Image: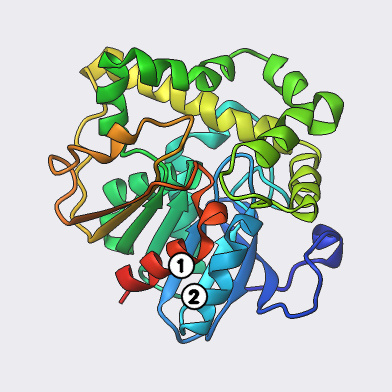
Amino acid sequence: MPATDAAATEWTVPADGEVWAHDTVETNGVELHVVTAGPEDGELVVLLHGFPEFWYAWHHQIRTLAEAGYRVVAPDMRGYNCSEKPDGVDSYHIDELVSDVAGLVRAVDRESAHVVGHDWGGLVAWQTAIDRPGIVDRLAVLNAPHPARYEELLRRSPTQIAKSWYAFFFQVPRLPEWSLRRGDFAVVKRMLREKPIRPDAFTETDIERYETALGRPGALTAAIDYYRALFRRNARLTLTQGGLGDTSIEVPTLLVWGERDEMLDVRLTEGLDEWVADLRVERLPNASHWVQFDAPARVSEHLRSHLP
């Protein structure tokens, strides 16, 4: 794994007390900026962030997992922060994102990993376990719905349709980028300040770091293209085969859910036995969608108890 060029990581967290290092990995035709921590011979844990985040979304958990002896790899997913940002909506198709994860595992000389994801990273984690079960030892997902359960609830729940308004808005060309960028990302800043349940879940320094990461050239459009690519893919599958097809998962799975999520209905944690053979659900009543910031110690505790 080659060291990252200093110019590519001009922005990092302060060096004081860091347990991690910054590197670059080539996978599936793109270069991803990754943060690594923990002993090199430890069991591999891959942490996948969501929208509009970057590797730093896991800074509470990275330290805990590394100190517990795991080898932790937390990438900036393609398009985000310091990772490469290929052009075009098709570059962010879920198949490409899954292939990024598979290539990342291979790039660190492993055959498999424990895969953990939040929000969009959770969607990629679900799909990786569906499409590439051989590379996932254990799966953990935070506030991201199993794809078949989400599709099922969308079809019959006006409440979830209303909660998902932003995903439909993101299909519009250019307007979402303008809306989010306006006022130096005022909407994003307000979301991070107001939506979590715990006061100061995101510090002002955290928010500045998020703004810096999302403001990198091409990052905002790439992040929104995730939604555009998934919408087109799911619409095509629905039209051609009536749904998403086989989405079964056999690996041991942990679903952690902040119940005060304004974007995702808590019913998405129910009725998953049809698709997930070995499932444990932990619902946190005093946490929001930003569950690993609202309840960092609880999330770390649940991950530690789930991972071998």
Find residue 118 and report its horizontal and vertical position in percent.
Answer: 47, 49
Tell which circle, 1 or 2, labels the residue nearer the N-terminal end: 2
Near-viewer residue (174 or 260):
260
Q: Which quadrant of the structure image shows residue 225?
A: top right
Say whether residue 127 is left or right of residue 9.
Answer: left
Say whether residue 40 is left or right of residue 15.
Answer: left
Badge 1 is on which residue? Answer: 300
- The residue mark sitting in front, 1 or 2, is 1
Residue 136's place in the image compared with 122, above or below, is below
Question: Which amino acid is tagged 1?
Answer: Ser
Asked if residue 86 can be seen in this view, the reply is: no
Disc 1 to disc 2, C-alpha distance:
8 Å
Asked if residue 56 can be seen in this view, the reply is: yes
Label 1 SS = helix
Near-viewer residue (263 or 218):
263
Residue 127's place in the image compared with 159, above or below, is below
Question: Which amino acid is tagged 2?
Answer: Leu
Residue 177's place in the image compared with 38, above or below, is above
Mark 1 and mark 2 residues within 8 Å of each other at the beta carbon: yes
Label 2: few (<14), some (14–19) or many (≥20) C-alpha neighbours in 10 Å = many
* Quadrant housing the C terminus: bottom left
Which numbered circle lies on residue 4? none
Residue 190's place in the image compared with 251, above or below, is above
Near-viewer residue (253 or 134):
253
Instruction: Identify which residue is drawn at 28% across, 33% down.
Output: 267
Instruction: Identify which residue is drawn at 61% across, 29% down.
Output: 224
Q: Which quadrant of the structure image shows residue 239?
A: top left
Find residue 157 and report its horizontal and vertical position in percent.
Answer: 30, 16
Label 1: few (<14), some (14–19) or many (≥20) C-alpha neighbours in 10 Å = some
* Quadrant housing the N terminus: bottom right
Badge 2 is on which residue? Answer: 65
Find residue 292 and report its horizontal and vertical position in percent.
Answer: 52, 55
